[in-house]
Amino acid sequence: MVEASPKVVVVVPTYNERENLPVLAGLLADLAVPNLHLLVVDDNSPDGTGELADKLAADSGGTVGVLHRTEKDGLGRAYLAGMARALDEDADVVIQMDADLSHPAAAIPAMLDALLADDTAVVLGSRYVPGGSTAEEWPWHRKALSAWANFYVNAILGLGVRDATAGFKAWRASALRAIDLPSVQSNGYSFQVEMNYRVIQRGLTIREVPIRFEERIEGASKMSIGVQVESALAPWKLRFHRED
């Protein structure tokens, strides 16, 4: 008897990503990963990304889904909504991935192999393990800020993860259920740190595989001052917060 391939759902939040979304959808389709699905979580994009996602879904034969949200309330909230939908639709593996093409779709097979080889809970696409790198276009101060952010997070929380702020991850569905998604508090980019912290707190395993993180080509970055402040405060809130 041939064992069925696990259902893999790639959750991609979008806000004004009309240029990038069809490119990403094509890259995912070209991977030839069995039972791979794309779930677009659109926050009412004024540029028509949501309508484009609906067309992609209609033409996909059931491999593309769309979750429309009526307000833009942060990257973390969008990911949580998409993960909850994926779990409700019986995903075995949930991959979180940005729409801006900074995360290399070609790394997904290696991430899945690492996740399914043992009892690993989550695999990170990491810039800071041997073989990983950041975009050459990044100025030195941006590279320094990213490196400092990872040092800062690990110094406070002791995660033991080289790329603690990474946003490209493959999750076992069982791990997402174990960390209690409805109670996740962080939003923006600090969401990534809280999710890692919850994994470690529950004694689950994180693995890192190397990726090259690229600079977005189309559209604008969503990193605001408010997001940066929240990201700086989040590790302290997590360290001194006790769950019931």
Image (spheres, rainbow, N blue to C red):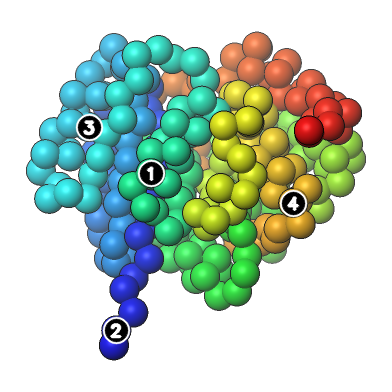
- Which amino acid type is shown beneath numbered disc 4? Arg
Residue 161 visible in image: no
Residue 210 picture quarter:
bottom right
Q: Secondary structure at mark 4?
A: loop
User: What is the crowding at mark 4: few (fewer than 14 residues within 10 Å), some, or many (at least 20)?
Assistant: few
Which amino acid, by three-letter code, is at mark 2?
Val
Give the residue number, with chain letter if any, for mark 3: 53
Q: CA distance from mark 2 to mark 4?
A: 33 Å
Residue 41 location, quadrant? top left
**Image spot of residue 87 (x, y percent):** 42, 46
Q: Nearer the viewer, mark 2 or mark 1?
A: 1
- The dot on residue 202 is 4
For label 1, the crowd category at 10 Å Cα-Cα, with few meaning under 14, some 14 to 19 and many 20 or more, is few
Instruction: Say what amino acid the circle numbered 1 marks.
Output: Asp
Q: Secondary structure at mark 2?
A: loop
Residue drawn at x 18%, y 31% is 54
Up-down relation of residue 165 to residue 43 (above or below): below
Q: Secondary structure at mark 1?
A: helix
Q: Amino acid at mark 3?
A: Ala
Of label 1 and label 4, which has the lower sequence position? Answer: 1
Residue 163: x, y in percent?
A: 70, 47
Viewer-closest of 20 and 88: 88
Residue that mark 2 sits on: 2
User: Which of the numbered marks, if any, corresponds to residue 88?
Assistant: 1
Q: Nearer the viewer, residue 36 or 214?
A: 36
Badge 3: residue crowd in 10 Å (few <14, some 14–19, many ≥20): many
Q: Quadrant of the N terminus?
A: bottom left
Is tag 1's residue or tag 3's residue first in the polypeptide sequence?
A: 3
